[in-house]
Image: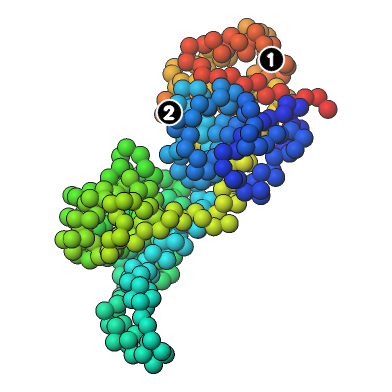
Amino acid sequence: MPERAHKIFRILTLNQISPLGLKLFDSGHYKVGSDTAEPDAILVRSHNMLDMDIPSSVKAIGRAGAGTNNVPVNAMNLRGVPVFNAPGANANAVKELVLAGLLIASRNLIPAIHFTEKLEGDNETLNKLAENGKKQFAGTELPGRTLGIVGLGAIGRLVADAALRLGMKVMGYDPNITVDAAWNLSSEVKRAESIEALLRNSEFVTLHVPLVDSTRHLVNRQVVQSMRNSTILLNFSRDGIVDENAVLEGIEMGKIKYYVSDFPSEKLQHHARVITLPHLGASTQEAEENCAVMVTRQVIDYLENGGITNAVNFPNIAMERESPYRLAVANANVPNMVGQISTAMAKAGLNIHTMGNKSRGEMAYTLVDVDSPVPQETIDEIAAIKGVLNVRYLPIPAK
């Protein structure tokens, strides 16, 4: 790790961030607080930033969690500001809650608990009432049952492994599965060609996809029609993935036995066949610490070295320092951008030691190490190139 620049980076926290993550910020080079003015970066968990006036000083946003629906990603794209998240850091916490949901629903535990709470009398009376009433709560065991998993990312894979160990059959559907995810997926997971095929063959269905335009109301009336009767549907992903009206209709039709969700809503409240939890998916000490540590490390690397890992709107890029003088350029992914950057450097008599360029969709990012200091005029010239969103000069001070 190269010596850090003398610059003091200012970090604004919008939520309580785990101290385990915050202590990674060297106090000699970082000022961290909930009232930090003109921050270089923002760390956030659940705070809604969509209507926030984000200072122009902000160079990065770190979301200590997986989803970024509370962050104005599109607006940050226009500024060339990466939005980091922590995929997989809370995966085990969510997996455990999914397993709890499976057991709660399959064994009818919520109505059984409510039944027992209302019993009154001495021990003999309570035992007699419990024995007489327990038949109505008889459930099903998990071995041999099929769990359908929609989305086979970090959480989906962990859920699949756990279900297999419980003796369940597992079917998965994920048209966007990555190569790495496919390699890490158990060969025992049967692939479904469509979500309808998965639903027709699964007694339990759990959803693990991000909320984007293509997944909003992924579970709709048409999809519910494809379900087997008495399906148990679990949603610990995002509320917008499920059309609540379709779910309630599915319950009335007998298609859905229970809907288990981490997202309470007025429409679902007090329904006998709906079990909602108060956003507990990542609410463990371990998950909060893992997310904070991961996203803090990513923000530090970006501020100091320009490296990008797990940004939802930028390509990943890592380049070892081979010179004390580095430029980081965020730009629109259009032709001849690298050529124009190189030309500006050549014009200033700068020798390019190493260059890395990656693109992702409409966004591109370039790291350049040169053998001598970069004049401000050259930085300004590159910043003026049409399509360049921002330029950061990241020199390492001499010891």
Which residue matches tag 1? 374
Earlier sequence position, callout 1 versus callout 2: 2
**Residue type at numbered disc 2:** Asn
Q: In the image, residue 294 lies at what x, y percent?
A: 59, 45
Tell me the element at label 2.
Answer: helix
Q: In the image, residue 320 lies at what x, y percent?
A: 66, 33
As drawn, the residue found furthest toward the front would be: 121
Residue 75 left/right relative to 259: right
Tell me the element at label 1.
Answer: loop
Q: In the image, residue 77 lies at what x, y percent?
A: 46, 26
> Disc 1 versus disc 2: distance between alpha carbons?
31 Å
As drawn, the residue found furthest toward the right would be: 399
User: Which quadrant holds the C terminus?
Assistant: top right
Which residue matches tag 2? 74
How dense is the environment of label 2, judged by Cα within 10 Å: few (below 14), some, or many (20 and up)?
few
**Residue type at numbered disc 1:** Val
Q: Residue at coordinates 43% horizontally, 28% vertically from top-left?
A: 74
The answer, for residue 353, to whether it is visible in the render is no
